Amino acid sequence: MSVEQPLWRALAGYRVLTLCYAVTVFGYNYGAYERPVPGGVFLAFLAVWTFATLGKVSAADRCTPRFLAGDITIAVTGILISPLVDVHARVGPTLPSIWVAGAVLAFAIKGGWRWAAGASLIIGIANIVERGAFSRDTIHNILLVTVASIGIGYVVEVARASERTLAEALRIDAATRERERLARDIHDSVLQVLAMVQRRGTAIGGEAAELGRLAGEQEVALRALVSSGVVPEPRATSAAEVISTLSSTAEPATDARSDLRSLLAAQSGRGVTFVEPGAPVLLATGKAQELAAAVGAALDNVRKHAGEGAQAWVLLEDEPDAVLVTVRDDGPGIPAGRLAAAEAEGRMGVSLSIRGRLRELGGSAELVSIPGQGTEVELKVPKDD
């Protein structure tokens, strides 16, 4: 809801209350007026106008400049005809009394402090003309209305600017999340396929080597696009979707939940040892698939960087408030600074496929690597509420 919406509701209430006040003052002092009939006619018209235009002061798009012009015209008219009704100024307040401040506040909420200053100036001139001279009370009332309306107008402008800034920040955050998701999908599917084609083509030789070279060039170009934030719109089949296919053959989910053991067991095999608890580890299906995809990305890194002969272990632990998956290998480890350099080159296996996924799940991904002693990746995801 817009932060200025409560101001419009307050303005509508103010107009009704001040109308009641003006009518009460007129009725109480009816006998003191020299010509009460014109005053009664004006207040009757003012009452009809106030209630008929409540919808106009319910939102900024309904409060049109035409309505504002009519509103302030009625306020000025009421001020200027007051001497005709209260000839000897026995009562004091003008016929519309403090209702005129509502007209000025409408300008403030609609157009900001500049519109408020202009409307205050019009009302101030009308009050001076009505009095026929400057007086302490007149100047006091004019200053009070002017300061209040300008202050409210300024607050409205600041609120609108804050809303625009927040909307832009949310838009950028949503775009960043979508870009990271697409980048993960590209890394988990297209980039790995291109890298495999390049390796196999180079190994086979001949025409396949040329195909591998072209695949390598496309891999480099696509990594540059991913790292620079320009990600193509078409979405390739992601690792999460592959895991989803695997999960369809696993144990049926209970209340949209999946057993994480089944998803991780599908990734075990030669060189990968999976250790699981004896009881099912249930997570929301989408969360389980994303966590399994992150484990798959970690195992891909083991196969790619630790060598074909490396051994990997996947340990699944079911804690009271979270699920913990540890992926450890006996490879050569990761040299210091290598992850930052890989990210700069557009290789997003750790930053997006692993850490990005865990961040969106509300969890964490910790990586510990000692050169010569292997690498350990700890993935922690909070359980569903």
Image (tube, rainbow, N blue to C red):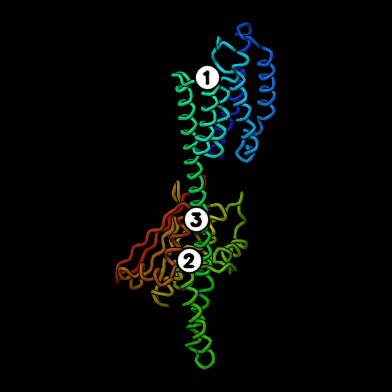
Question: In the rendered image, which residue does mark 1 sit on?
Answer: 131
What residue is drawn where x is 43% and y is 75%?
Answer: 304
Query: Hey, what amino acid is under mark 1?
Result: Arg
Q: Position of residue 212 (x, y in %)?
A: 51, 85
What residue is drawn where x is 48% and y is 51%?
Answer: 169
The label nearer to you, 1 versus 2, is 1
Asked whether residue 153 is in view, the answer is: yes
User: Is 175 situated above or below 303?
Assistant: above
| Left or right, residue 72 beside residue 320 | right
**Residue extending furthest toward the bottom:** 206
User: Is 320 situated above or below 377?
Assistant: above
User: Is 153 situated above or below 317?
Assistant: above
What residue is drawn where x is 52% and y is 28%?
Answer: 125
Quadrant of the rendering where the N terminus is positioned = top right
Disc 3: CA contacts within 10 A as few (<14), some (14-19) or many (>=20):
few
Question: In the rendered image, which residue does mark 2 sit on?
Answer: 229
Q: Secondary structure at mark 1?
A: helix
> In the drawing, what numbered circle is on residue 157?
none
Disc 1: CA contacts within 10 A as few (<14), some (14-19) or many (>=20):
some
Marks 1/3: CA distance?
Answer: 56 Å
Query: Hey, what amino acid is under mark 3?
Result: Ile
